[in-house]
Amino acid sequence: MDELFVATVVSPWKQVVKRLDERWASLNDEQLEMQVAPCKNRLFYLLGHLTAVHDRMLPLLGIGERLHPELDDAYITNPDRTVPDPFSSDDLKQAWSEVNAAITSAVEKFSHDDWLKKHTAVSDVDFSKDPTRNRLAVFLSRTNHASFHTGQIALAK
Amino acid sequence: MDELFVATVVSPWKQVVKRLDERWASLNDEQLEMQVAPCKNRLFYLLGHLTAVHDRMLPLLGIGERLHPELDDAYITNPDRTVPDPFSSDDLKQAWSEVNAAITSAVEKFSHDDWLKKHTAVSDVDFSKDPTRNRLAVFLSRTNHASFHTGQIALAK
């Protein structure tokens, strides 16, 4: 039962990551400079943004240290086109793959109880008041965040 | 533990529905005719599309008959601007609210085991081969689908 539950909650994450993997692989440097709509984020920015947000999941889920904290300034703290891109597209695509592989590998080993443990950004006191602030909540939230931007990315042709 | 699990998986659904509730409420008829990007879907179409897709969840999750099957032709089977809108914006917003209320009310009563039962579009044989084709999978998939289009809707100002 636990295995089934874990497989079911991890599946949408794997699907959205795979969809984005295929999208990034299909884009050359010029295409990555496309914007999802006029005056909106570049695809390159969203690749960096999703990589940085997923990288933050490693400590948040208690599964490891961050791999690429140097992405935050360009892709979380600041809006698109205000800070130089710190990585080449190839390096950024590689970071994307590494970060997601680390997350998927770790969460696939989570038991039912592991999922319901607190995430690291909530205190023991706050968690005792609201036990839905658990790892599963973070994981589902980030999966939906990836879907949110995937919808935007789908608009750029 | 079951209650906590149910609350955690239902929370992202409630969040995305609430976010869209607020978005639709803020839009008048003229604004609903905006497109998410040049030559892409109107907001009105996405309101209809999400209502129809969620309406289909009622039989799919085994929680009731469809409330608005008449939306499928305009918002699932055909692309935007090829079929007349069957409802006024007020009626469509009301349908959106009714459908989501019915789903939320039903799934909040699901036990852990209820979530892992098969959805109604999979046969007993296929479900025995792949038990991840359960109600939770449908629910998480549709939540991510709503997030996908919410990302697009956020681009239209």
Image (tube, coloured by chain):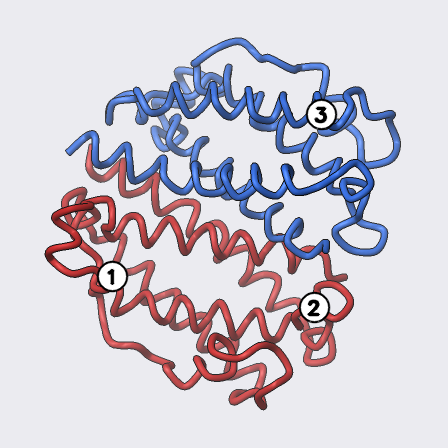
Chain colours: A red, B blue
Q: Few, some or many C-alpha atoms within 10 Å of disc 3 (few <14, some 14-19, many ≥20)? A: few
Mark closer to the observer (1, 2): 2
Contact, mark 1 vs mark 2 (Cβ under 8 Å): no
The disc label shown at residue A40, or none: 2
Tell me how far mark 3 sits from mark 1, CA to CA: 42 Å
Question: Residue flagged by tag 2: what amino acid is it?
Answer: Lys
What residue appears at the point 25 percent right and 22 percent down from the top-left corner?
Answer: B111
Q: Amino acid at mark 3?
A: Asp
Residue at image mark 3: B90
Q: Which residue is mark 1?
A: A61
Q: Quadrant of the N terminus of chain B?
A: top left
Label 3, secondary structure: give it.
helix
Residue B11 location in percent, x, y? 36, 39
The mark that comes first in sequence, 1 or 2, is 2
Residue type indicated by callout 1: Leu
Label annotation for residue A98: none
In this rendering, which labeled residue sits more in front, label 2 or label 3? 3
Q: Position of residue A87 (x, y in %)?
A: 52, 87
Q: Residue at x 74, y 63 (%)?
A: A37
- Disc 2 sits on a residue from what chain? A
What is the quadrant of residue A21 in the picture?
A: bottom right
Residue B93, how many percent across, how many down?
Answer: 65, 27
Q: Residue at x 80, y 47 (%)?
A: B34
